[in-house]
Amino acid sequence: MPQIKHLICYKCGVTKTSYWYRDYDSKGDWTGKHVCYECKLKINREKNRKIKEDRLKDRKCAICEGIDTYITSKGYECWARHYSQDGKWDGKSYLCNLCNQRIRQEEMSKVIKRIKEQRLKERKCAKCGDADTSHWYKLYDEKGHKTNLWICRRCYDKDYNKRPDSHNSIRKIMSICRSGRDIDFNKFDELLENEKGRIGENIVSETLGVKNQNDVADNYISPYDLVCHPRYGRIQVKIAGFDIKNQSYDFTIGTEHEFDTLIVLCMDKERPWKDVKEVYIIPEECDELYGESYINIYKGSSMSKWKKFRVDEKPYNNTYHNMDIYKKFFK
């Protein structure tokens, strides 16, 4: 396009541009000046921005009634239309970004729930053919690989009781551990996990002044470790040394939580342990423990979700230092 001579942009002062535009005042009258193509774009953007700001000035969320929402890195506010139950928009109702995301998540959860319910209606046990059970388990093949088939709880329990790591299989080992074999710190590396667990149970039971449920029931397969405490109810105890490689304390608590309170003892990295470093008392009903089978507590993490459950470890450490097995080895 040929350039129009003798025109100068009153904004930036250029004399050459792809297009020239007249400049108008607020009343719509031409000021006698011209602007270049780039400056015209900037003017339009600024005008649109002011119009949008005026339009959003009194906007608030239809659910939380908040006036703030998420702002992108480019400065755009994220608002979403709020539709009625019949899917219509009234032209003025909006949702802030947080409420909009929550609604979308709830809708997605409902869809997933409907899909799961439909699948459960069609599911049958691959072994007995039963469609009614309190819990479903994945079926594994002979090589230990997960298949797409399911088995009911009754068939799962039958298979589980035959395994070497089942309660029935380790019951004898646990009985020997807790009734006929003394724990010797000189052979700490040879101690079974059940024996180490008994150390933790003794620390907590003596500190809180309650008895060990396994001793009271005399069957060593109780679903929880300590008898009912007036404050903590049924107590499950877990103990672990510090894992230097992962820089954490790792605990396995299982999928079935048949206790009211979980108490975990974090020991030091020494073998045998010299001190109780940290103690956590976690109620089973808390959100942090819901659905968890494992707990990992990382050393020095100020953002840990378990931090609020930590208690003073000194009473437990004093109990540990006064135990016969400790004094016999260290003193």
Image (cartoon, grey):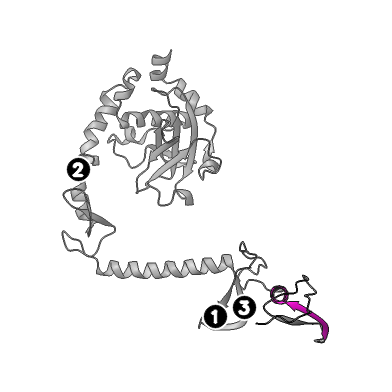
Q: Amino acid at mark 2?
A: Arg
Q: Return the residue at label 3.
A: 93
| Residue 60 coordinates in the image, percent (x, y) | 66, 72
In depth, the one of 255 and 247 nearer the eye is 247
Instruction: Tell me if residue 229 can be seen.
Output: no
Alpha carbon of mark 2 to alpha carbon of mark 3: how far?
60 Å
Image disc number at residue 84: 1
Q: Return the residue at label 2.
A: 163
Rate crowding at label 3 as few (under 14), some (14 to 19) or many (20 or more) other CA atoms within 10 Å: some
| Residue 21 coordinates in the image, percent (x, y) | 73, 82
236 displayed left or right of 29 = left
Disc nearest the viewer among 2 and 3: 3
Alpha carbon of mark 1 to alpha carbon of mark 3: how far?
9 Å
| Residue 328 coordinates in the image, percent (x, y) | 39, 14
Alpha carbon of mark 2 to alpha carbon of mark 1: how far?
56 Å
Image disc number at residue 310: none
* Magenta part of the chain: 30-47
For residue 195, which quarter of the picture? top left
Q: Are marks 1 and 3 in contact (CB under 8 Å)?
A: no
Helix, strand, or loop for circle 1?
loop
Instruction: Tell me if residue 320 can be seen.
Output: yes
Q: Amino acid at mark 1?
A: Ser
In depth, the one of 280 and 76 nearer the eye is 76
